[in-house]
Image (cartoon, coloured by chain):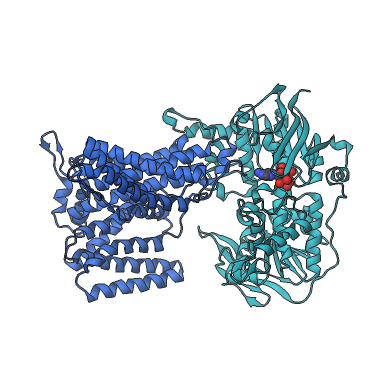
Amino acid sequence: MKRLSELPAWLRWSLYAAGGVLLLTVVQTLEGTDRLTSVTSAQSMLRWAIPILLAGLGGLYSERAGVVNIGLEGMMILGTWFGAWGAITYGAWWGIVAGIIGGALGGLLHAVATVTFGVDHIISGVAVNILAPGITRFLSSEILTNIPGGSITQSPRVPGVGSATIPFLAGGTIGNWTTPDLFGWLGTREWFFISDFANLLKGVMTRVSWVTLIAVLLVPLTAWLLWRTRFGLRLRICGERPEAGEAQGIDVYRYKYIGVVISGALAGMAGAFIASPELSGIYLEGQTTGRGFIGLAALIFGNWRPIGVLGGALLFGYPFGIGLRDLDGSASHGLILVNAIGLAAVAIWAFTRSKRTDTVLALALSGIFALWYFTTDVVPDVWINILPFVIVLLVLIFFAQRLRPPAADGLRYRKGQT
Amino acid sequence: MALAIELIGITKRFPGVVANDHVELKVEEGEIHAICGENGAGKSTLMKVLYWMLQADEGTMNVFGQEVRFASPTEAIGAGIGMVHQHFMLADQLTVLENVILGAEPVHALGLIDFDEAKDHLKKVAESYGLFIDPDDLVEELEVGERQRVEIIKVLYRGAKILILDEPTAVLVPQEVEELFRNMRDLKKDGATILFIDHKLDEVLAIADTITVLRQGQSVATVKPDQVTAQDLAELMVGSELPTPETTESTVRDEVALEVSGLTVIDQDERVIVDDVSFRVRRGEVLGIAGVEGNGQTELIEAVIGTSPAARGIVTLNGADVTRATVRHRREQGIGYIPQDRHREGLLLPAPLWENAALGHQTQQPFSKGIWMDRQGARQRTEDIRREFDVRTPDVDVPAHALSGGNQQKLIVGREMMAEPSVLLAAHPTRGIDVGAQAAVWEDIKAARRAGMATLLVSADLDELIGLSDTIVVMLRGRIVATLDPATVTPRDLGAFMTGATSAGAA
Ligand SMILES: Nc1ncnc2c1ncn2[C@@H]1O[C@H](COP(=O)(O)OP(=O)(O)OP(=O)(O)O)[C@@H](O)[C@H]1O
Ligand SMILES: [Mg+2]
């Protein structure tokens, strides 16, 4: 364990991923299904992961600047509406831009309240979450109802920005030439684990939306921006020790504003993505279903680091993606076994570190999941939708213990009070 | 000689307080100039005005003969002024390098920080003054003396010619103070001008070229160290005599109030921080713990109060095992706690004084009435603390950050002492408190000790440690390495034990 934590982040996360896939493969073999590691499962995982990733990265910018942003959900809602409206009126790419602007406005509101007026961050965030659906409802009644096919709760069809398949690895085309499909070939070999891994990789590389590509590229970009540039250092000092920044003549308020507005912009982009054909292809009231909050969960799971947020987004996106296509409840049934085994592993790990409460809790939960698994054949409808949230909760319970949030995260900061 | 700084008629008002009242100050180029004055005299405020973190309401300021008017510290830094604050301004989770370059980052195109250049520059600055530090260390892993070095490097990195050091020695043990003074003399040799604040008058007399005394916001005297004694200085500051802590006859009784056996604390990275420590403190006894900071004293105290868990060992309070008890339970059983870092663990800076006075005692009289806070009682108690411990404040509704550093400390000491604890855990109880008030705190601890209070005392001030303790133990790398008798030990011997220069058993 100790040596693992000394590895570079990307390698460590790759190993975690490999471990996860191995677990899925084993369960899949026991369960006699192929849905856990199919190409389409990976595709829907990625689609679900993107809004979570964007919201999580949004939260990262805000919290690194010291402002807790639980208003991500509201900003995402603004993004769905503006994204749909922009795409319908001006075209797909403008939809993304409009979504970003809509979310950024939500962020600006949060910044004004928390930074300028010193309102408690949670209160302001909740206010944004309450306000956003009201605003979109109002805008719908004023604008969407005048568009053919639109109503007060939904829009007509939203156009998408298009997608691409990665050449060579997943058989994408260059010009008219269809390149070889490495992972596709590996995936059909039926080699234990290797084929499963290849399928999942092919899934995340097939018909990838351009927005998805941008979102994934934002991960290294964010890491670079926050840890390599002057802007990033100054933004981070606002989340760690704003007084220290102030003493060096840094305009803390300005950086907090920038952080929170970027945060809103990314949440808005997530919203626009949800409304795009990648996930919905329509604006529909209430369609974000708490993904802003799950973005926050990914942020926490990822220990306030970009690559960790990506890990969290994929991890949380997976059960949602599985649940989405699981009409008969058999794939979710497999997930239950995954949970049982995962929790048992946690119990062993906790035991070796003599964490008594964790051990007992994980063991008990593992037992419950195992019992559930062996006494049923499928997961009933309601549980298919609830299960992913349960998984998010479990992950946070056991993995959110040794975290390092920015030291001044969520604290009210006033100039000249040191 | 030319003047580096001249302040003429500087006045700074806060609601209800005139912190600086037409202050006059002349600092010559290349001198070490000390500012003395009791808590709340306006020293820190004056320094912040000089650094333009605060804007003066009246008065003018000349730097190297030129009248200046700045908008922010950035411009003051540009004019060659640098400040090390009374409370460190460092981000724990950032590296030394990041903390140092902040606000003065060398950059490539696109705002990309040139870390190589930054590191070179830092190393050059650090080496030329013998300030050794690894730029890649996280600040949280550093000991207090090292943190201070980072703060000083931070100022030098910007090429400051005028250095302001606000109470730099308060957190240091004597060896570290000597090292700091050596650095200050080196800086002076290189032509730097240094302004510094210190409550320890013998230190002031040892290093300063000129001393300016502030009293209630006014500059009352400027003297040369060879013309005055510590006694004279104290009289100028507070109009009272200079106290010395001296041992009174033992009041140790038989009943054990606090017993710790086999206590071991392990940190997140699984390093052993406190290693199998055992001791007893009886009623009426003061057990002093000596040690350079970072040798486990803090963690030991935290394990006794319960804020960090003990991996092994037993803590017994007045006969009851409290090893697994919550902090609140231990508090309610009569533990008083003066934490070492008043900002981090002692106060809620934005909250009013009366709320701060209730911290840690919120479930007890006179702060609570059933499940409710008793605001009336809390206010009354805060007024009592203010009176008895001489906390200088316009009223008890001001936020804690509006108090001067020493007055914040007095509030904490007052809060704990007024609750009449049976066991007091005191980490640097008089840190940042002026000489007059320090004597009062010592008297208070002695009175409580006569009444049966058991005290665990950690202090960097060896005179305080020797003067108050009935027994002294020395901690080194998490272990108790010596048990000494304060009646016979000298600060010099103690220092040798603390650094491990002398090992061996007891005296
Ligand atoms: N931000 C503030 N708001 C209101 N009052 C303040 C503020 N800062 C300082 N004061 C008041 O100004 C006075 C001078 O404070 P200052 O911090 O300069 O004292 P000091 O001489 O540094 O004392 P110490 O030795 O205790 O550090 C005090 O009465 C304090 O209460
Ligand atoms: Mg001060």
Residue A10: % across, % down = 35, 48
Q: Residue A185 vs residue B424: left or right?
A: left
Q: Nearer the viewer, residue A341 or A405?
A: A405
Whether residue B258 is visible here, answered yes or no, is yes
Q: Which residue is drawn at 19% across and 61% down?
A: A326
Q: In which quarter of the image is residue B165?
A: top right
Q: Residue B298 vs residue A183: left or right?
A: right
In the picture, one chain is blue; tell me its letter. Answer: A
With respect to residue B400, does A366 lie above or below?
Answer: below
Residue B424: % across, % down = 71, 65
Work out which quarter of the rendered image holds the C terminus of chain B and state it: bottom right
Q: Residue A105 vs residue B378: left or right?
A: left
With respect to residue A137, does A1 lie above or below?
Answer: below
In the picture, one chain is cyan; tell me its letter. Answer: B
Work out which quarter of the rendered image holds the N terminus of chain B and state it: top right
Residue A86: % across, % down = 26, 38
Q: Nearer the viewer, residue A166 or B37?
A: B37
Whether residue B501 is visible here, answered yes or no, is no
